[in-house]
Image: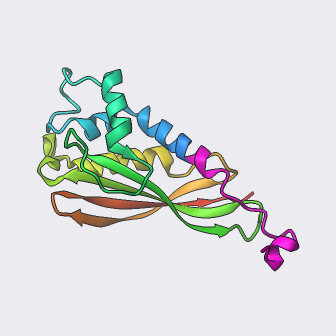
Amino acid sequence: MAGIRDMMGLNKANFSTVEKDFSDITGRIMANETILKLLYFNSPDCLSNKNLVITPEIIEEITKDNLRIVPSVRVPENKGSYIIITFDSFVENPHNPEFMNNVILMDVLCPEDTWMMDSYMMRPFKIMHELQKMFHDKPLNGIGKVFFMGANLLNLGDYVGYQMAFSVINDV
């Protein structure tokens, strides 16, 4: 049954852009060779070792195992790090009811024994740095921009990392 707001034509926002946003986000991540190496190769020198190359087969495996758009925890076959992308906290934009604001959560999880890399770099922070560079203050498919809000620790036993939160404000 239609609500009063629907009958009055006030609820025009819908979820039709989520699919496009997921596609945009995963496309940007899959185009970032640094993130792909950090997700797939567990060695401390994965960024400096010229012998570690991302092949089409590795990209297929990363797409299947290391980059998730379904919010589930499953250890990748290669025991690598992974990112889970979820959309949360949808609300109608008060200034433009044809669009919704929401939060994008990116869980960055790494096996605890792969955290330390060359030069005291830590794998989850390097991944988060790359994600923040790709998405903070950048547009998605809507009319607004994505803004980094913060990150909180996630400890799942052998996998430890952070949940990054980005707000999507669709204002004109």
Q: Residue at x 22, y 59 (%)?
A: 160
Residue lying at the far left in this picture: please name it: 113
* Residue 139 in view, yes or no: no
- Looking at the image, residue 25 sits to the left or right of residue 100; the answer is left
Queried whether the magenta region covers residue 28, the answer comes back as no
Residue 90 point in image, percent of width and height: 60, 67
Queried whether the magenta region covers residue 10, the answer comes back as yes
- Looking at the image, residue 10 sits to the left or right of residue 50; the answer is right
Q: Residue at x 18, y 20 (%)?
A: 51
Q: How many numbered discs sit on the rendered protein?
A: 0
Residue lying at the far bottom in this picture: please name it: 4
Residue 7 point in image, percent of width and height: 86, 73
Residue numbers of the magenta segment? 1-21
Vertical comparison of 37 with 73: above or below: above
Residue lying at the far right in this picture: please name it: 8
Colour mapping used in the image:
rainbow
Q: Residue at x 73, y 71 (%)?
A: 94
Q: Nearer the viewer, residue 102 or 75?
A: 75
- Looking at the image, residue 35 sits to the left or right of residue 168; the answer is left
Vertical comparison of 21 with 86: above or below: above
Residue 96 point in image, percent of width and height: 77, 64
Q: Residue at x 40, y 57 (%)?
A: 71
The quarter of the picture where the N terminus appears is bottom right
Residue lying at the far front in this picture: please name it: 1
User: To which quarter of the image does residue 93 belong?
Assistant: bottom right
Residue 101 point in image, percent of width and height: 63, 63
The quarter of the picture where the C terminus appears is bottom right
* Residue 55 in view, yes or no: yes
Q: Of helix, strand and loop, which mostly describes the magenta segment?
A: loop
